[in-house]
Amino acid sequence: MHVSYHGHSIVKIKTGEYTILIDPFINGNEFTDLTVEKESPDVILLTHAHNDHVGDTVELAKKSNAQVIAVFELANYLDSLGVNAVGMGLGGAHEFEFGVVKFTKAFHSSSFTTAEGEVVYGGMPAGILFTAEGKTIYHAGDTEVFGDMKMLGERNDIDVAFVPIGDHFTMGPEDAAYAVELLQPKVVVPIHYNTFPPIKQDPEYFKSLVKDAQVNILQSGESIKL
């Protein structure tokens, strides 16, 4: 399995048979190396409904007939746009052909703003636990640190955790480092920083705060082999 980072909160997981994209915010993201034209995911996983996470989901899903998995309300909205969407709830897990997806809590907000300016309620924000080929990946989504991360760490052998460090809208470096202490992953990758001025951060500072996990600061397109 190869797991790669592509700027902001985009994560790509490549298993033996499937390509899974998480939060594919491509157009409008100057920090990504991806283009919509070249991507053909089999599956798209979404943490929440904000435009910088839903991103190019609709175009990608229609182009490649990708299955989109999201929190129930967001999935219903995407289904209304002609996308093959599966809705799930927080705490729920399902074993798909490509792996097991479980949505966890995240403390944030979740709404989508259409091109016409309409605000669509997207249900609860979420984190994602994804397990395939004997490996577990945790994508925290947009969130603050919260005590139940300790439970997630104790009940799941997390190989790689992707955690936001941008501050302002999510936890910053200090709280993210504490989140790592609670989650106990083998490897942690900082995400959701530097895309916009309010979330400008130095990932090396975050790395200096983490004591009990390997920190991989990935540039867009760089990957980890599990």
Image (spheres, rainbow, N blue to C red):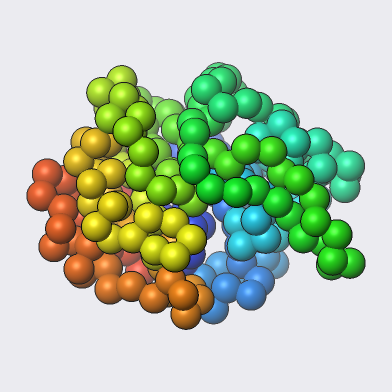
User: Which residue shows up at 66% across the image and 35% down it?
Assistant: 71
Question: How many marks are shown on the rendered structure?
Answer: 0
Q: Position of residue 142 (x, y in %)?
A: 49, 51
Q: Is residue 77 left or right of residue 219?
A: right
Q: Nearer the viewer, residue 51 or 95?
A: 51
**Quarter assignment of residue 212:** top left
Please say if 32 is above or below 68: below
**Quarter assignment of residue 181:** top left
Q: Position of residue 55 (x, y in %)?
A: 67, 60
Q: Nearer the viewer, residue 180 or 41?
A: 180
User: Which residue shows up at 67% across the image and 60% down it?
Assistant: 51
Q: Position of residue 161 (x, y in %)?
A: 33, 44
Asked whether residue 13 appears in the rendered view, the answer is no
Q: Position of residue 201 (x, y in %)?
A: 33, 73
Please say if 16 is above or below 134: below
Q: Is residue 168 left or right of residue 176?
A: right
